[in-house]
């Protein structure tokens, strides 16, 4: 028995689509791996910086603790492969996390650190000649997102780069995804991106047993790789459109 339930593996069409998305993401340019001339060339072509931002926190007993940032890193990779631009290293700086609900192995940072990190990073990316900065948030704590939004607004008052800062679900709310926590949507997305980091067998098979640290529709009933592939594809397509529109404004 594989680490994900058999019904995930049985979705052959979704598996092939997920594989294509994964291969496309491998074409993304990673800031930390670039030589100076490579970065200079990409800045001249498409001066876009993608910043995947998440938290290290409990995501049920069935998913990796770094799910938030790993998820949006892969989405940034896929989008950058379409639009051009560079993907920054992961940020695991979460505020308003599951630590507040008593969940273990969760790292909680301050609101001030979140805002300061955003502002300093945006200023440095501007200094490095990026014209568009995309901060994609995979962590949805309301106060965390509010801190990100405040920092983006503050930077935009004097900053020269255009900033797009949002959680990935904001791009596809019309498809029913409004953000959850290790439930139907995140489990579906993560299983399509990192099946090796999802182990549904860790969840109680008795559906009457409540899940620990899961918020939203029960992933044991509602999650599927097929749904994950569909929603990720839509997110990537729509994010790419938003980025291209910002580049045209330059």
Image (tube, rainbow, N blue to C red):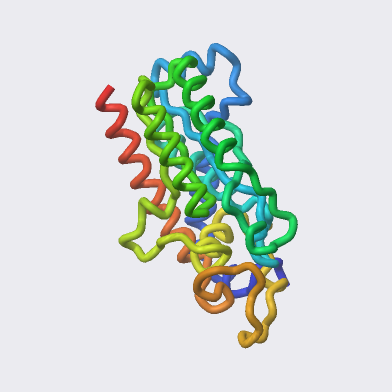
- The quarter in which the N terminus is drawn is bottom right
Q: Residue at x 40, y 15 (%)?
A: 44
Does residue 83 sit above or below 9 in this rendering?
A: above
Q: Quadrant of residue 173?
A: bottom left
Q: Horizontal and vertical percent for residue 141?
A: 52, 54
User: Total label count?
Assistant: 0
Q: Residue at x 36, y 56 (%)?
A: 172
Relative to 60, is 159 on the left or the right?
A: left
Q: Horizontal and vertical percent for residue 169?
A: 42, 54
Relative to 223, is 4 on the left or the right?
A: right
Does residue 68 sit above or below 132 in this rendering?
A: below
Q: Residue at x 61, y 85 (%)?
A: 207
The front one of 8 and 245 is 245
Q: Residue at x 44, y 46 (%)?
A: 146
Q: Horizontal and vertical percent for residue 178?
A: 41, 61
The front one of 28 and 114 is 114
Q: Quadrant of residue 245?
A: top left
- The quarter in which the C terminus is drawn is top left
Does residue 216 sit above or below 78 in this rendering?
A: below
Q: Horizontal and vertical percent for residue 37?
A: 54, 12
Q: Quadrant of residue 82?
A: top left
The front one of 147 and 59 is 147
């Amino acid at each position: 028995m594989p680490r994900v339930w058999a019904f995930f593996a049985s979705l052959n069409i979704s598996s092939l689509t997920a594989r294509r998305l994964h291969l496309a993401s491998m074409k993304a340019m990673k800031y930390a791996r670039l030589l100076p001339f490579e970065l200079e060339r990409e800045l001249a072509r498409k001066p876009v910086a993608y910043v995947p931002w998440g938290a290290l926190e409990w995501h049920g007993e069935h998913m990796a603790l770094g799910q938030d940032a790993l998820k949006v890193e892969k989405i940034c990779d896929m989008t950058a492969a379409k639009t051009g631009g560079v993907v920054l290293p992961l940020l695991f700086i979460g505020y308003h996390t599951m630590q507040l609900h008593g969940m273990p192995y969760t790292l909680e940072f301050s609101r001030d650190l979140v805002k300061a990190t955003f502002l300093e990073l945006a200023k440095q990316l501007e200094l490095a000649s990026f014209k568009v900065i995309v901060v994609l948030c995979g962590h949805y704590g309301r106060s965390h997102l509010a801190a990100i939004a405040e920092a983006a607004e503050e930077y935009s008052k004097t900053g020269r780069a255009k900033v797009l800062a949002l959680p990935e679900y904001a791009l596809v709310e019309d498809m029913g995804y409004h953000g959850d926590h290790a439930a139907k949507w995140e489990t579906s997305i993560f299983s399509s991106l990192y099946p090796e980091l999802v182990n549904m067998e860790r969840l109680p098979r008795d559906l009457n047993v409540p899940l620990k640290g899961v918020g939203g529709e029960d992933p044991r009933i509602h999650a599927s790789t097929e749904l994950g592939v569909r929603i990720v594809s839509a997110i990537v397509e729509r994010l790419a459109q938003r980025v291209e529109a910002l580049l045209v404004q330059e």
